[in-house]
Structures are given as structure tokens and as C-alpha cells.
Amino acid sequence: MKLLDLISAARIEYDRAADRLLPKNASTKPSFISSDKTFFRLINCYFDPSIRENMQKLGDSLSKDEVDSRRKKAEAYESILVIYDDEMKYCDTPREGCDSISTPRGIESAFRFINYHYKVAYDKWNRSGSHDDFDKFVGNKLYLKEYWELLH
């Protein structure tokens, strides 16, 4: 039984250490992501029909206990992680070409980055007055154009 306790304690400490490496600022790309293909794959996973119900729950009004536990958020990001690791999903962005993400907190930090830059691009598009194609406002972050298309 002591061995299981040690393994459990080690896993908890490993997760804490990994969480400390996550960026504090949403505009900073997570250090474990080196390829934009990772963002393309994450965006496709986010819109997967099999987890639509979990993603929609993120917009529900939560009680204080639910907010404190972050359970719904963790469940949603865990379901994205399962799809992200599935080799058979989204063959146009193969898993082996993407970075490794091991925890739901990693998924969360990647989406914080995506959503931050999406909002910046959206605000520029909205302020422009011309409402040209959205892809003119994403700069070199082409995955934001795909995010835009899937949202619409």
C-alpha cells in the first residue's frame, strides 16, 4: 500500500510542477507548444460532435461549489485531451505532427492563448469599418481563421 501512496504523491507533485510551467499571461504561447499544427488539431478537437454536450456545459451558470471545484471545466478539457490523443481523429492534422499535451491544464492554457489572440483579431476586424475577410486580421496565426470558420 505504501508504494501506491508514493506513486500517487509523485504524480500529484509532477502535475504541480507541470502547472508551474504554464504561462501566467494569456498572450504568451505555452512553452510546450512549438508547432502551429497543435493549435489546428486542438481547434478541430474542440468542435468534435462527440463532446459537444461537454463543451456546451462550460457556458452554464454554475453554483459556487461547482465554480470552486472546476469539475465541469476539467471534464471538458479531459474530453478534448482524449480526442487530441486519438490517432484516428482528424487525419488532416495527424497526431504525430503535433506537440505532446499531457494534462487538461495544458489544454486550458492552449485555449487561453487561442482565445486571447482570437479576441485581438476579432476586435481589429470589428473596428476596421470595412469588415473585410477575417483572415486579413489574424497575421501569421492562420489557425485563428479556422477557429473563426468553425465558430460561424
Image (cartoon, rainbow, N blue to C red):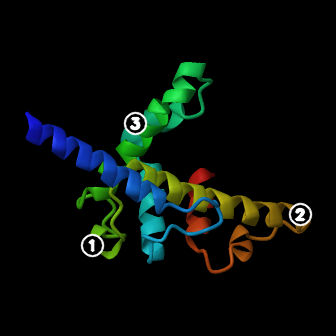
- Residue pictured at 36% horizontal, 40% vertical: 50
Residue closest to the eye, 17 or 137: 17
Asked which quadrant contains residue 88, the reply is bottom left
Give percent across and percent down for residue 115: 63, 56
Position in image of residue 59 (x %, y %): 60, 33
What residue is shown with label 1?
96
Observer-nearest residue: 149 or 102? 102
Instruction: Name the outermost residue toward the bottom.
Output: 140
In the rendered structure, which amino acid carries the disc numbered 1?
A: Glu
Q: Residues within 10 Å of mark 2 (few under 14, many from 20)?
A: few
**Sequence-first tag of 2 and 1:** 1
Seen as rendered, the residue at the extreme right is: 129
Give the residue at mark 2. 127
Q: Label 2 amino acid? A: Arg
Quadrant that contains the N terminus: top left
Q: Is residue 44 visible?
A: no
Image point (56%, 64%), residue name: 146
The furthest residue to the front? 2
Above or below for 130 versus 76: below
> On the rendered structure, is 100 left or right of 121?
left
In percent of width and height, residue 32 lies at 42, 70
Looking at the image, residue 131 sits to the left or right of residue 63; the answer is right
Quick check: 30 above or below 115? below
Among numbered discs 3 and 1, the one appearing first in the sequence: 3
Q: Mark 3 — residue?
A: 75
Q: CA distance from mark 3 to mark 2?
A: 36 Å
Decide which of tag 3 and tag 2 comes sooner along the chain: 3
Q: Which mark is residue 65?
A: none
Instruction: Identify the residue at horizontal 72%, vertical 58% (top origin).
Output: 119
Secondary structure under tag 2 reads helix
